[in-house]
Image (spheres, rainbow, N blue to C red):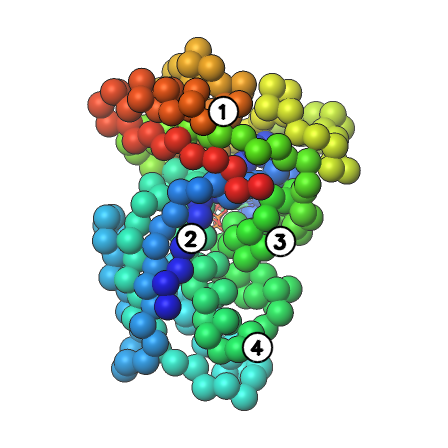
Amino acid sequence: MELLAPAKINLFLYVTGRRPDGYHELCSLMCAVAIYDRLVLRMGGARSTVACHGCDLPLDGTNLALGAVTVFNAALAAETQRRPEQVAIRLDKKIPVGAGLGGGSSDAAAVLKGLNAYHGHPFDEGRLCALALVLGADVPFFIRGRPALVTGIGERIRPYAGLPAMDVVIVYPGFGLSTAAVFKNLNLALTKSKKKLRYFPFNNGSFSATHHLHNDLEAGVGEHFTVLADIKERLCRLGAMGAAMTGSGSAVFGLFANAADASKAKDVLEQQPGWQVFATRLLT
Ligand SMILES: C[C@](O)(CO)[C@H](O)COP(=O)(O)OP(=O)(O)OC[C@H]1O[C@@H](n2ccc(N)nc2=O)[C@H](O)[C@@H]1O
Ligand SMILES: Nc1ncnc2c1ncn2[C@@H]1O[C@H](COP(=O)(O)OP(=O)(O)OP(=O)(O)O)[C@@H](O)[C@H]1O
């Protein structure tokens, strides 16, 4: 079975609070983009394995693709009459790791959905999302896959129909960041998000690339990595309608009105040594 796992960007991300367990409550507009990891699943065998191509990831149960097999098989055994099967996964990694592009989360969601289809859909989308949340806060979004307003720590997902088709240029600056460390470094008192959120047209009002891009995690990350502000400025000078960091970084994206402008910006930016640049589009 062959699966494609897309990346995501956070068009806006507000941190609205902190739970007693340390996780942060968010309000984020998320959309998948057309950059894909490719996974090939071979069913059967004595034990589940993952082999990664194009990156250096752990190959044990901490690999989110393999973690998804464990979570799925445990639920299958406990909640249905079906017999779990071991899976050998080949992962061709295209989405930069630790970039805020949700690559690991998307791999996990693709495996959960793939195994669910293979076993004849024993779980509905709601149950799959609950299994997904065990693997990470971003994984339920990828189960649904459509543009969405995401709240809670990532488990409340409301489809959002107000996103226009847009072209996107994503710049990975050559280093990844730890999501946990970025949240730890956040000064919640400074975000004052609840007030700013009032300005967004929540009920599927149309999204504006010039007014609504925002990321509460950006200031803290930008203090340590000034290259992110440089990338934003260069994207805007090259014609982006707006630019922001995605998720917990390190990648920065710019939104463009058409594919020709996005492609031109990519050609210029990828001259910079160490940067990886993608010209892609929102999967609206
Ligand atoms: C920042 C986002 O990318 C926005 O889409 C996501 O919220 C991150 O989701 P994720 O990578 O799936 O995160 P997880 O793997 O669940 O969490 C990694 C660590 O980040 C912190 N974390 C994550 C999500 C969240 N809402 N609050 C947090 O404080 C926690 O310390 C957690 O231990
Ligand atoms: N299949 C996988 N793909 C990518 N990262 C994985 C995978 N499995 C485990 N990981 C681990 O997850 C961490 C970051 O993963 P990922 O690339 O999804 O981060 P991210 O893009 O910042 O995600 P998010 O936006 O969800 O915070 C790394 O420490 C990496 O080793």
- Residue 146: percent from left, percent from top: 59, 48
Q: Nearer the viewer, residue 175 or 186?
A: 175
Element carrying mark 3:
loop
Distance CA(mark 3)–CA(mark 2): 19 Å
Quarter residue 175 falls in: top left
Do callouts 2 and 4 mark residues in contact (Cβ within 8 Å)?
Answer: no
Residue bearing the label numbered 1: 258
User: Neighbour class for label 4 at 10 Å: few (<14), some, many (≥20)?
Assistant: some
Estimate the spatial distance between the alpha carbons at disc 1 and disc 4, rounded to whole Å. Answer: 42 Å
Residue neighbourhood size for the residue with mark 1, other residues' Cα within 10 Å, grouped as few (<14), some (14–19), many (≥20): some
Question: In the rendering, which numbered label is found on residue 122?
Answer: 4
**Image x and y of residue 126, in percent:** 64, 64
Q: Is residue 137 visible from the viewing direction of this image? A: no
Residue at the spot of label 2 = 5
Q: Position of residue 4 (x, y in %)?
A: 40, 55
Mark 1 and mark 2: span between their CA atoms? 24 Å
Whether residue 6 appears in this view of the structure is: yes
Mark 3 touches mark 4? (CB < 8 Å): no
SS at mark 4 in the image: loop
Q: Amino acid at mark 1?
A: Asn
Identity of the residue drawn at 45% across and 59% down: 110
Whether tag 1 and tag 4 are in contact, CB under 8 A, the answer is no
